[in-house]
Image (cartoon, rainbow, N blue to C red):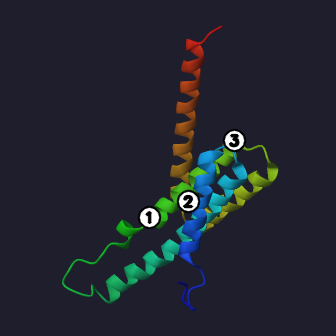
Amino acid sequence: MQSSSQCVDPSNLKWAEHTYRERLRLQPEDMAVRLSLAWCLFMQAIHRSGQETILDHAVVHIGPASNDAPVNASTVERSANALLKDCLHQTYIIKQLSIDQVEQQDVARLQALVELAGARDIMVGAEEHSVQQLVALAREAMRTTDRFEW
């Protein structure tokens, strides 16, 4: 249940993510759904980053509540970094496969926001990973076509 001081309900975002992933499982070529997933992941990453900041602040300034080691929230839920990497992975798929100008503009906006948020290193790493995946896919396609020469 959403408290009155909470303006973002993470359970709604998680439900939306699940829905988008299920639709992509059935229709992986649907770039509009993939873009919605990327936006959803971005929102979750921003929200999670805020939680991590508050948690870090509490541990540093207040200290653990007991003698036990503090619970690492990132082990319970995905970290903001992991969410942002997944978001960027989706954007690079769209960037490489979609010919729709509106989708391309939306990807550019989303990537600009990621950079504005200070996650340039994550963005560069995600792009490098995307290029590696494309190269591997191209190699596999070439190997497959070599086996089936007409």
Q: Residue 113 vs residue 128: left or right?
A: right
Residue at mark 2 to residue at mark 1: CA–CA distance: 19 Å
Label 2 is placed on what type of residue?
A: Arg
Tell me the crowding category of disc 2: few under 14, some 14 to 19, or many 20 or more residues within 10 angstroms, Cα based: some
- The image quarter containing residue 77 is bottom left
Label 1 is placed on what type of residue?
A: Arg
Tell me the crowding category of disc 1: few under 14, some 14 to 19, or many 20 or more residues within 10 angstroms, Cα based: some
Disc 1: which residue? 78
Disc 2: which residue? 120
Which residue ends up furthest to the right in the rendered image? 101
Looking at the image, is mark 3 or mark 1 earlier in the sequence? 1
- Where 129 sits versus 10, above or below? above
Q: Nearer the viewer, residue 87 or 24?
A: 24
Label 3 is placed on what type of residue?
A: Leu
Residue at mark 3 to residue at mark 1: CA–CA distance: 27 Å
Q: Position of residue 66 (x, y in %)?
A: 22, 86
Residue 97, disc? 3
Q: Residue at x 68, y 54 (%)?
A: 33
